[in-house]
Image: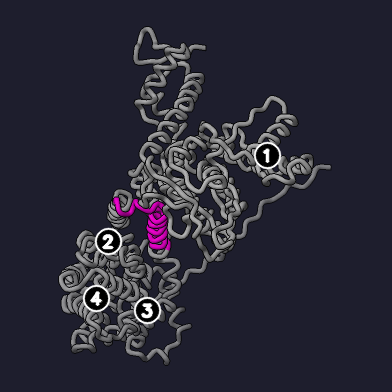
């Protein structure tokens, strides 16, 4: 069987011919027009919005949308012109109030009209690309009210006058201002900008230009900054109360330009109250205010930074070159630390810990610290003073603070190897005399130095501590094995110092007293017997001794003296008086050291164990010395120091500098060889640059010295000049 055929059935809408009354559109519009009049006349309570909506709906449905729209424009325009006339008649302060009230009424009316014409808004207006009802109402208000010939200029003048009154300290109606300015913003950002913001910025510029000139002529820097800050805050507050939030950047820019940028050079350099005076007087509040204001304008922070940098460099230069301030190394370094603390506090408290300012401070310190070639020595002397006595009784935290400050100065040194030389000498004296405040503090500083410069920098310093520890063990073993043999003699304590680790000098040993010499020989025999391949050299210029002495009336004292002083005093066991030449012959102590020892034993009041004839401060070869039977002291134990300058003498200074220069030569050569080994061929300027880069953590090599080391390496056939280009050097494998 065949399947039945499918039929396509279509159902069409019933076409009923609707006949519209020819006067329908006119009648309906009259109803809607009347409703709009009633709405504007505040009589909307008697209207049926449902019926009105249906009428507007039907007009659009029956293709009368154009008549409805044009009628709306005409009716609203007529009403707004009447409203404009009423606003124009308002006098004085009532003008803004009337404008605000009519604007509020217009918005309410517009909302009702929009609800009635909602169908037109959704269908007719989009299809014909006409302006929506609400936007149309705003446009008509702008054209017929705000931009009317008698309102526009008056409104602008009134708003600007109110702002001026507030700037002069008068109280205004901020709520009314906020409503009127919001109206301008609702009418479009261009209306707010053209009708109010641009004129406001112009008159504000004029106002602050005049006011800032008055302030700058009558105020000091601190007062001026306070007034500028107050004005800036007032403008920011004004924006928050009644201006468009986007106006803040524009209005503050005007204040910044006229009150800060235009006068910042004069403010910074103002006599008796400018930036330098603020720094000198630690005026953190004024400095912070200057920083916060100046950072708002171009080049403001850099101007403060440049003036501060110039001031710090000038102060620092005076400090490191003033001969009076160089007399006391410890005080000199303390002044440096005080200056650093002062400016650190300023940057931290006033400049928001700005890294660019911190870098400028560090750069300034590095500049002037290295102007004085003795700074490394002075820093080491400062450390020596602190670790000998200055940190006694101080908490661990405070010790760490002092050491960190020392490290800060150390980082700024270019000649770190010079500091190392002096530090090693001072550390050796502290360890050998047992006068260090704390081994922990000593080790802490060495750890900091190692972290900063690497193991090579501190390896010898650590070796010194190791020697002290092994020396204690050696002496315990010596006394244990030789106890009976040395029981009756003097008690001997020996520090065994590894050659190379300690800053020892090749000094010929002096003639020790027989009693001491016997014990020393026994120790030497014991030590060489227990260690093979070693050699002992007595450093008699570095030791100390404790002596007991009895004076004329049976008064007894114990003296702590140097080894040299002990050798001198022991001579007076066998003689009451000796000439200078007798002492030289008997002890063979070097002349310079002997004179210092005799000065401390005979010329220092309260410690004059010997008498000198003739009596004077200086020691000459014709002097004679006698045991002082009448010596008295209220202390049983008396320490006799050696008269010696805290700072190096000129010859010692030259010797130290020469040793440093000699030590640098192999380091420079090693750096050159390392660079040439990896680069193979390089020109002179690049070698100097690379060597400086490699060695600047220890010292800043002199280009002339680098050139000499290159010549030396060429002579020893590590390098050669390129045959085609004599400016190039080639590494010889």
Mark 2 or mark 4: which is in front?
Answer: 2
How far apart, in angstroms, are the residues tagged by discs 2 and 3? 64 Å
What residue sits right under mark 1 in the picture?
A: 519
Q: Residues within 10 Å of mark 4 (few under 14, many from 20)?
A: many
Residue 299 visible in the snapshot: no
Q: Secondary structure at mark 1?
A: helix
What residue sits right under mark 4 in the picture?
A: 146
What residue sits right under mark 2 in the picture?
A: 276
Q: Secondary structure at mark 4?
A: helix
Q: Where does the N terminus fall, quadrant-wise?
A: top right
Mark 3 or mark 1: which is in front?
Answer: 1
| The one of 307 and 541 positioned closer to us in this rendering | 541
> Is residue 614 inside the magenta stretch?
no
How far apart, in angstroms, are the residues tagged by discs 2 and 4? 54 Å
Q: Position of residue 707 (x, y in %)?
A: 37, 22
Q: In terms of secondary structure, what is the magenta stretch mainly? A: helix
């Amino acid at each position: 069987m065949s399947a039945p055929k499918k039929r396509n059935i279509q159902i069409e809408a019933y076409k009923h011919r609707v006949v519209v009354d020819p006067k329908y559109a006119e009648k309906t519009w009259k109803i809607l027009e009347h409703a709009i009049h009633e709405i504007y006349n505040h009589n909307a309570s008697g209207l049926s919005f449902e019926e009105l909506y249906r009428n507007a709906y039907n007009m659009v449905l029956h293709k009368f949308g154009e008549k409805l729209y044009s009628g709306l424009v005409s009716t609203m325009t007529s009403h707004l012109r009447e409203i404009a006339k009423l606003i124009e008649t308002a006098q004085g302060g009532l003008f803004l109030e009337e404008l605000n009230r009519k604007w509020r009424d217009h918005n309410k009316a517009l909302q009702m009209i929009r609800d009635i014409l909602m169908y037109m808004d959704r269908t007719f207006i989009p299809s014909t690309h006409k302006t929506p009802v609400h936007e149309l109402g705003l446009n008509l208000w702008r054209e017929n009210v705000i931009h009317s010939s008698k309102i526009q200029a008056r409104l602008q003048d009134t708003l600007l006058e109110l702002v001026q009154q507030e700037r002069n300290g008068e109280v205004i109606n901020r709520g009314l201002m906020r409503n009127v300015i919001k109206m301008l913003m609702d009418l479009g950002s261009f209306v707010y900008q053209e009708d109010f913001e641009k004129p406001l910025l112009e008159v504000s510029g004029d106002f602050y230009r005049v006011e800032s000139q008055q302030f700058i002529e009558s105020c000091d820097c601190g007062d001026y900054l306070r007034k500028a800050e107050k004005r800036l805050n007032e403008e920011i507050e004004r924006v928050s109360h009644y201006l468009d939030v986007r106006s803040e950047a524009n209005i503050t820019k005007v204040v910044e330009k006229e009150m800060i940028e235009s006068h910042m050079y004069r403010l910074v350099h103002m006599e008796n109250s400018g930036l330098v005076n603020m720094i000198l007087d630690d005026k953190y509040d004024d400095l912070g205010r200057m920083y916060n204001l100046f950072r708002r304008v171009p080049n403001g922070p850099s101007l403060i930074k440049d003036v501060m940098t110039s001031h710090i460099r000038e102060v620092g230069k005076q400090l490191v070159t003033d001969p009076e301030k160089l007399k006391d190394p410890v005080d000199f370094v303390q002044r440096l630390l005080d200056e650093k603390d002062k400016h650190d506090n300023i940057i931290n408290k006033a400049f928001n810990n700005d890294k660019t300012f911190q870098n400028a401070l560090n750069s300034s310190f590095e500049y002037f610290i290295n102007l004085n070639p003795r700074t490394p020595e002075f820093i080491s002397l400062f450390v020596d003073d602190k670790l000998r006595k200055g940190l006694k009784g101080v908490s661990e935290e405070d010790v760490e603070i002092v050491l960190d400050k020392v490290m800060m100065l150390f980082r700024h040194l270019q000649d770190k190897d010079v500091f190392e030389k002096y530090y090693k000498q001072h550390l050796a004296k502290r360890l050998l005399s047992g006068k260090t405040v704390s081994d922990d503090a000593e080790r802490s500083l060495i750890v900091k130095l190692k972290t900063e410069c690497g193991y090579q920098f501190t390896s010898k310093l650590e070796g010194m501590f190791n020697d002290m520890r092994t020396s204690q063990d050696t002496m315990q073993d010596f006394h244990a094995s030789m106890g009976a043999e040395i029981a009756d003699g003097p008690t001997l304590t020996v520090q065994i110092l590894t050659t190379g680790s300690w800053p020892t000098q090749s000094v010929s040993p002096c003639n020790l007293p027989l009693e001491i010499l016997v014990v020393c020989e026994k120790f030497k025999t014991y030590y060489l017997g227990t260690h093979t391949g070693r050699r002992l050299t007595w450093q008699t210029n570095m030791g100390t001794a404790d002596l007991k002495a009895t004076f004329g009336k049976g008064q007894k004292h114990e003296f702590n003296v140097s080894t040299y002083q002990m050798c001198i005093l022991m001579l007076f066991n066998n003689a009451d008086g000796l000439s200078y030449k007798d002492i030289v012959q008997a002890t063979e102590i070097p002349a310079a050291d002997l004179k210092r020892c005799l000065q401390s034993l005979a010329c220092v009041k309260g410690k004059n164990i010997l008498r000198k004839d003739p009596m004077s401060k200086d020691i000459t070869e014709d002097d004679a010395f006698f045991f002082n039977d009448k010596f008295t002291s209220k202390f049983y134990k008396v320490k006799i120091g050696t008269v010696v300058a805290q700072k190096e003498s000129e010859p010692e200074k030259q010797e130290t500098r020469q040793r440093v220069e000699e030590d640098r030569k192999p380091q420079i050569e090693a750096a050159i060889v390392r660079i040439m080994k990896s680069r193979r061929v390089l020109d002179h300027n690049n070698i100097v640059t690379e060597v400086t880069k490699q060695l600047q953590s220890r010292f800043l090599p002199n280009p002339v010295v680098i050139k000499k080391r290159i010549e030396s390496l060429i002579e020893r056939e590590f390098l050669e000049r390129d045959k085609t280009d004599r400016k190039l050097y080639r590494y010889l494998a």
